[in-house]
Amino acid sequence: MAGEGNGKRAALVIRTGGFEGTRYELAGEETLIGRNPTTDITLLDEGISREHAIILFDDDQARYEIEDLESTNGTKVNGKRVRNAPLAPGDEIQIGHTVFEFVIDA
């Protein structure tokens, strides 16, 4: 499982946009975020695409990165619109009206 070997677990925690405090563990190598009920993290927000963004674990570099899936309204990391970007603990990810914090627990 992604990130399991180093004893750390990554997650997204909702900070604003409703459902504050909800935590989504990033257990697999890919985590799909969108409005479609088949996504790994489903957000009921008309401002996001059915398949909006994906978080990938890069085993070679032992890091997570987010990739926008050519969504209409884009994906922001720390307030800046990105196509793809590496993630560091404490980063804020905005998708539609929802803001997540990227966290890594030891």
Image (cartoon, rainbow, N blue to C red):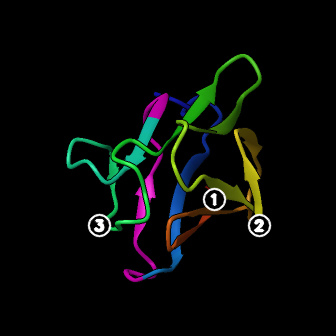
Q: Is residue 13 magenta?
A: no
Q: Amino acid at mark 1?
A: Phe
Check disc 2 and give the amino acid type.
Gly
Query: Helix, strand, or loop for circle 2?
Result: loop
Q: Which residues are magenta?
A: 18-30
Q: Residues within 10 Å of mark 3 (few under 14, many from 20)?
A: some
Q: Percent x, y for residue 8?
A: 61, 45
Residue 73 is situated, as x and y percent measured from the top left of the image, at: 55, 56
Residue for badge 3: 44
- Camera-side mark, 2 or 1: 2
Q: Which residue is mark 1?
A: 102
* Secondary element type, mark 1: strand
Q: Is residue 40 shown to the viewer in this render?
A: yes
SS at circle 3 = loop
For the point 40% across and 83% down, which residue is it?
A: 18
Is 23 a magenta residue? yes
Q: Which residue is mark 2?
A: 79
Choose the circle earlier in sequence order: 2 or 1: 2
Task: Tell me residue 57's x, y (percent).
Answer: 60, 30
Secondary structure mostly taken by the magenta-highlighted segment of the chain:
loop
Q: Is residue 49 left or right of residue 80?
A: left
The residue located at (76%, 66%) in the rendering is 79
**Residue at 20% across, 49% down:** 37
Q: CA distance from mark 2 to mark 3?
A: 21 Å
